Image (cartoon, rainbow, N blue to C red):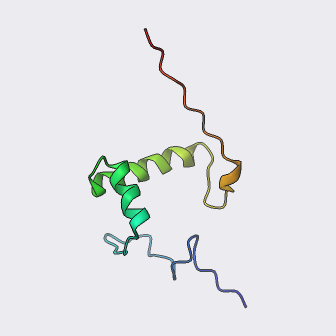
């Protein structure tokens, strides 16, 4: 018997109506939120949610293999 533990194996799925959640962050997760928010973890959290929304609208899903994703960022023209 296989028990599905969510995408990241964090235990039971969260209630989609939750208003608050707590999670201990590891050093890499903390650094990611700080980088995304330019030193503000709350802003970083919101930035990551906004970015995921964009990727989701482009077709990214939780089960999409990350190895097949290619991101092309256009370079700004310099005068």
Residue 8 drawn above or below residue 77: below
Q: Which residue is the extreme one toward the front? A: 27
Q: Camera-side residue: 45 or 79? A: 79
Q: Which residue is the extreme one toward the bottom? A: 1
Q: Which residue is the extreme one toward the top? A: 79
Q: Residue 1, percent across and down?
A: 73, 91
Q: Camera-side residue: 34 or 16? A: 34
The residue at 71%/49% (across/down) is: 68
**Seen in the image, is 43 located left or right of residue 28?**
left
Q: Residue 47, percent across and down?
A: 38, 48
Q: Residue 66, percent across and down?
A: 65, 54
The residue at 40%/70% (across/down) is: 26
**Seen in the image, is 48 located left or right of residue 59?**
left
Residue 19 drawn above or below residue 77: below
The residue at 60%/39% (across/down) is: 71
Q: Residue 8, percent across and down?
A: 56, 71
The residue at 49%/50% (across/down) is: 52
Q: Camera-side residue: 44 or 20? A: 44
Total number of numbered discs in the rendering? 0
Residue 37 drawn above or below residue 72: below
Quarter that holds the C terminus: top left
Res 27 quadrant in image:
bottom left
């Amino acid at each position: 018997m296989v028990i599905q533990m969510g995408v990241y194996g964090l235990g039971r799925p969260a209630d989609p109506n939750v208003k608050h959640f707590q999670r201990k962050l590891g050093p890499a997760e903390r650094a990611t939120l700080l980088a995304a928010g330019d030193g503000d973890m709350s802003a970083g959290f919101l930035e990551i949610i906004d970015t995921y929304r964009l990727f989701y609208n482009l077709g990214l899903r939780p089960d999409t293999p990350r190895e097949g994703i290619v991101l092309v960022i256009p370079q700004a023209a310099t005068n």
